[in-house]
Image (cartoon, rainbow, N blue to C red):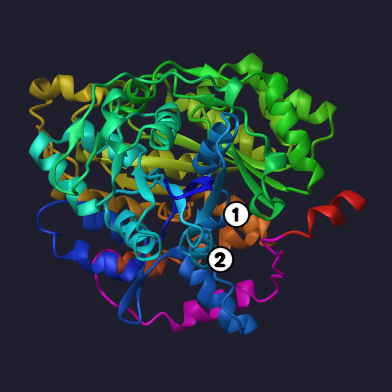
Amino acid sequence: MPNAGLDCIIVGYNDINFGDYAARQKKLENTSGAYHELKTNSVLLHGRRHTYMELINQAMERSQGKNPQLNVFEAPALGAFYLRNYLQRRGFSARVINFFTYDKDKFAELLASHPATVAITTTFYIEYAPVAEIINFVRERSTETKIIVGGPYVFNLSADLDTGTLEFMFQQIAADIYIMDSQGEETLARVIDCLHNRGMSQLHAIPNLAFTLDGTTFTKTPRLPENNSLDESTIDWSQVDPSQISPICYLRTARSCPFACTFCNYPTMAGEHVVTKLENIESQLKYLHSIRTTDLVFIDDTFNVPLPRFKNLLRMMLREKLTFRWISFFRCSNADEEAIQLMQEAGCAGVLLGIESGDPQILKYMNKQATLDGYKWGMDRLHKRGIATFASLICGFPGETEASVANTIRFVEESAPTFFNVQLYYHDTRSPVHAKAQEFKLQGAGYNWRHRSMDWREAMEWSKHMFRSVKNSGYLSLYGFSLWGVAYLLSRGFSMDQVKKFSYLVKPMLFSSLDDVPGNFSDLESQLTELFRPTVLIPHNPPPLSEVIAA
């Protein structure tokens, strides 16, 4: 085996060139709505498409003379740190490359010692190009290192594709080993142990794998779904360089989701909804507070479920004087006055609401277990306490009509969430609604579908109408931004007021860009420059730990 001193380097996100990606997707605009989704997450400016974070970087460069290269993926890749923690507790040595795009020099230095393995997570990928770029980087520097790829992208490929197509995709990605489980950490540990003691040829005894010895043919092992304990895998953040978890850190306090929305396959994939003990959360928060982490993002799909536990968590934060600013997912149907008051007191800055639709019948089709009155009540209470709301909407779900779209627009205008976003419906054939394909006359998959009341092209036009019709809310992109981007910007010294103004200023740019029409936005660019001129950036890297402890 290669260097026994380092068992695994775990690689987080790779942010590909957005302009190149947009050009590739544009070629397919007549076959699916994927390019439309890309357009809703960018603006056409000076001959190319720019993400929302790029717009802020450009405005900062104009106002302060230097591009700060802000990127939400600077925040810790929670999955990568979770895997590192899991491996270290089992006696393996592991390091994290949090953000490949910015950390290539550090990565190259680690590869010079020829580590045994590199494990690549795929949480945010929808194509293989970013993974292939990381693999090529490794191959050029350490040919002996075995490359392992796992995570949601690989799991979805293994679930959706026939054997021949799956093997073709694996050949394109060009890794040595693929982990096909929705969790995968136990499988990763077993793979590293096997490579140390028995070699690649013995991997057939480990479930949840596809591996190759020649780069062409693959051996696939049986499925044995993992069910790892969240409490036993609580991250020991004291073993992590503080520069990687300050000023912002992501935390998970639960796994899966107890609800069964019909458009979502996540609960089926992730398994039973389980929560972490409060004492484990408390120990993590106390350490993060001690190293001056200021901002948190709780990534639980249902952070305020169950409600009594949620309240106890907030009371603990208040009792221990853990003064963070934080953001999370939130369900209005699972809250009361006391919970929202505790949220304000405990530092909640904003919540992401899976509203999905403002039409009661569509909500029933989605099995949202929520009412419009409940949404309005929740948003009203949140806004009164200064908590920002981000309403996520879907356009084109089976049963969607012109009337249901109008109802959604009316609802959003009346409830006035701080920010909103409209996503074109994506049909996952493993989601519960697929069981009713005959009832809805539903055909196709992904962004290429039709049902009894519209197809993806019609839904695309209705989503444009929704964007242009909503006046009382600011629009935020989901790609590399969303509410997590707001948390990241707050941690770097921006104000919520700046983000709100930004979300309104970019609307005219978005409207023009939705039709691929370049516009002259020099006046808006000037306004963005002035908006961010007063910003004093907080460094991403904090003082050395010794200085923090001394202080």
From the viewer's side, name the closer residue of 512 and 138: 138
Q: Position of residue 540 (x, y in %)?
A: 67, 61
At a point 62% along the width and 63% down the height, the residue shown is: 498
Q: Residue at x 22, y 42 (%)?
A: 212
The residue depicted at 69 percent of the width and 68 percent of the height is 537
Marks 2,1: beta carbons within 8 A: yes
Above or below for 255 versus 384 = above
Q: Is residue 397 left or right of residue 131?
A: left
Q: Quadrant of the N terminus?
A: top left
Which span of residues is magenta-colored? 514-541
* Residue type beneath disc 1: Tyr
Query: For this rendering, which residue is in front, 147 or 376?
Result: 147
The residue that mark 1 highlights is: 488
Q: Position of residue 76 (x, y in %)?
A: 57, 49
Q: Which residue is mark 2?
A: 70
Residue 472 higher or lower than 63, as above or below? above
Quarter of image, res 406: top left
